Amino acid sequence: MQKVIALNEFIIQQQQTDYPAAGGNFSRLLHHIGIAAKKVNREVNKAGLIDILGKAGTENVQGEEQQKLDIYANETFMAELQASGECCGIASEENEDLTTFHEGLCSTAKYIVCMDPLDGSSNIDVNVSVGTIFSIYRRKSPIGTPATREDFLQKGTDMVAAGYVIYGSSTVLVYTAGNGVNGFTLDPSIGEFCLSHPNIKTPRSGKIYSINEGYYEKFPMGVKKYIKYCQEKDTATNRPYTSRYIGSLVADFHRNMLKGGLFIYPPTDSHPNGKLRLLYECNPIAFIAEQAGGAAFSDSRRTLDLQPETIHQRVPFYVGSPEMVSKLQEFLKAAKDI
Ligand code: AHM
Ligand code: MG
């Protein structure tokens, strides 16, 4: 029988080989993220059977309508992170302010977490895949004191780990701790995330471009020209490419990372700085992309090099196969967009 490696076992093994002196704090944090993911998965899977689908009748800090599952996922991840005793603060898409823990179990916690508990949740009512995105940083302020804004406004290059969970036809948890990317599929029969995608590497180029073309008229000229380039026939470069856009970042990125492709969310009329949030959407995805051999840019800058200014800051985002990212940048430069 093939040996199954469960997420917890994998984390402990990695800790022993990569960080033999570590005390297990980080492993415990990831373990609790896994528990929260299983709880959210359970609710996402029975959506439709119980009264958890649909709008909650409230808005989040960005004026976006909250779905009931957004609130459930937020509360579940917050509770598990606190219960781990390893998290001293959380920035969440669903919370206007930071949440900090510095007493009791969390008095020695050294990690802060930025998260989008349920990304793409406007798709949930129609059974489209949604996801959780998270990033983990070491706090800069002294342990035992309330975490500060500066603890959260760290550059992506300071990230300790990042991951996402995709609740799709199967549920997959993908994470990196800066030493490659690994994916674990939830086996519902034993309730464990099992290693299914070891050492993920993205193709250097691909045939998929992902962008909401409904906003075409308002895109920067370089993006418009790049889309036309994707659509032109040229056998030498495998064009025309295929357009695939789910409208759920985790699902779009996951597909492109495995198959080769480019995800683009440029500035638009309604979102002049781009729609996606730097701290808990772009940076974790950028870290995973780079660890898989891909690239991630926000206009001319490497996303991970940006200095965050606010918790809910939005940036343009181009992520995927490295040769496709470079090609898009050529078009942006030629059109003087960047
Ligand atoms: P959300 O965090 O409110 O769910 O919004 C983020 C989502 C991403 O998953 C997706 O890439 C994007 O919004 C889709 O936006 P649009 O509908 O403008 O194409
Ligand atoms: Mg989101």
Image (tube, rainbow, N blue to C red):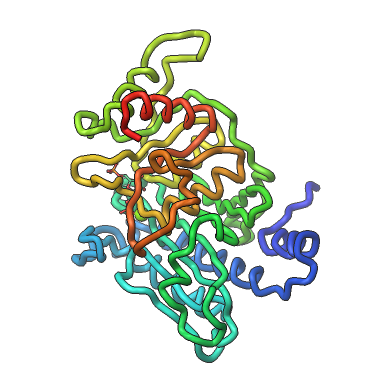
Q: Is residue 266 visible?
A: yes
> Measuring 30% from the left and 48% from the top, which residue is drawn there?
275
Which picture quadrant has residue 263? top left
Front residue (pair 295, 241): 295
Specify whether 286 is left or right of 55. right
Residue 290 in percent (x, y) is at 57, 43
Residue 277 in percent (x, y) is at 36, 54
Residue 181 in percent (x, y) is at 63, 48
> Measuring 27% from the left and 32% from the top, which residue is drawn there?
220
Q: Is residue 45 visible?
A: no
Front residue (pair 153, 255): 153
Image height of 44 relative to 215, above or below: below
> Measuring 36% from the left and 61% from the top, which residue is drawn there?
309
Residue 111 in percent (x, y) is at 56, 72
Quadrant where the C terminus lies?
A: top left
Front residue (pair 246, 169): 246
Image height of 14 relative to 209, above or below: below
> Measuring 50% from the left and 14% from the top, which residue is drawn there?
238
Image height of 56 relative to 301, above or below: below
- Residue, far bottom: 104
